[in-house]
Image (cartoon, rainbow, N blue to C red):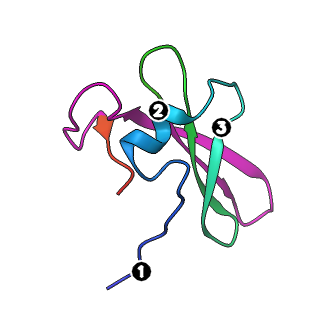
Amino acid sequence: MPRKIKNPKIDSRTAREKCPRRREPYWAKISTGCFLGYRRIAVSGTWIARYRDHSGKQNYSALGTADDSIGANAKTVLTYE
């Protein structure tokens, strides 16, 4: 079973509520070159992936809406887990 990555700033709904709104995401390192980002905006935040490909280029990908104001459905609204 893989270990769970903890990040006290973004790993719970209440912790994310305390984060100030800003354009730059809060990043949690998953593995070398792979990060999970959380960007807090008006009502609900969004999850973002940041990773490096084989050539070393940094890529970003929107994953979905965070479960800040509505419940997760595992398709478009996602939890930290």
The answer to whether residue 73 is magenta is yes
Q: Which mark is residue 17?
A: 2
Q: Position of residue 75 (x, y in %)?
A: 25, 39
For the C terminus, the image quarter is: bottom left
Q: Identify which amino acid the numbered label 3 is placed on.
A: Pro
Side of 8 relative to 69 (left or right): right
Q: Which residue is mark 3?
A: 25
Q: Which mark is residue 74?
A: none
Q: Which residue is mark 1?
A: 3
Q: Nearer the viewer, residue 11 or 1?
A: 11
**Would you place residue 65 above or below residue 75 in this image?**
above
Q: Identify which amino acid the numbered label 1 is placed on.
A: Arg
The tag earlier along the polypeptide, 3 or 2, is 2
Q: Position of residue 10 (x, y in %)?
A: 50, 48
Q: Identify which amino acid the numbered label 2 is placed on.
A: Glu
Query: Image point 40% across, 34% down: which residue?
Result: 64
Q: Nearer the viewer, mark 3 or mark 2?
A: 2
